[in-house]
Amino acid sequence: MSAAKLARLYRIRGRVQGVGFRYFAEHSAHALGITGWVRNRDDGCVEVYAVGSAEELAEFAGMLWKGPRWAEVRGVEELEAAVERHSGFSVRQ
């Protein structure tokens, strides 16, 4: 029996655009079996929608706080979201 799926919307602030953050999030999500998407926002944040188990999402949030090598994460806002079905994890423009 698989764990219940939950969804979270993350907004990551700091130096997170132009440093490979979206591709870092995509790689991290694939490694954990998380589905959803990531995109840059006009306000300079990166937004991530993720669906997974509570344990997967907790580990993913920790990875988002770290970010890729050149990022400087200053904050991660985590909001509950409705579970939507996605076949994988994608980078949106």
Image: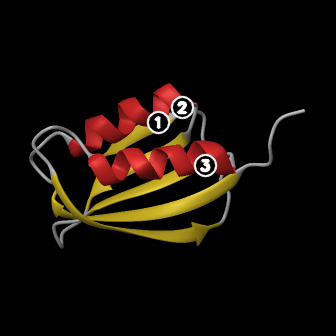
Residue shown at 18% from the left, 69% from the top:
42
Asked whether the beta carbons under mark 2 and mark 3 sit within 8 Å of each other, the answer is: no
How far apart in space, not on screen, are marks 2 and 3 (Cα)? 11 Å
How far apart in space, not on screen, are marks 2 and 1 (Cα)? 5 Å
Q: Amino acid at mark 3?
A: Val
Asked whether the beta carbons under mark 1 and mark 3 sit within 8 Å of each other, the answer is: no
Q: Which residue is mark 2?
A: 32
Q: Which residue is mark 1?
A: 29
Q: Quadrant of residue 74?
A: bottom left
Q: Earlier in the sequence, mark 1 or mark 3?
A: 1
For disc 3, the neighbor class at 10 Å (few under 14, some 14 to 19, many from 20) is: many
Q: Which residue is mark 3?
A: 51
Q: Regarding mark 2 in the picture, which secondary structure is present there?
A: helix
User: In the rendering, which numbered label is found on residue 20?
Assistant: none
Q: Quadrant of residue 48?
A: bottom left
Q: Earlier in the sequence, mark 2 or mark 3?
A: 2
Q: Amino acid at mark 2?
A: Leu
Taking 39 as reference, is 9 above or below it? below
Q: Nearer the viewer, mark 2 or mark 3?
A: 2
Q: Is residue 43 left or right of residue 78?
A: left
Asked whether the beta carbons under mark 2 and mark 1 sit within 8 Å of each other, the answer is: yes
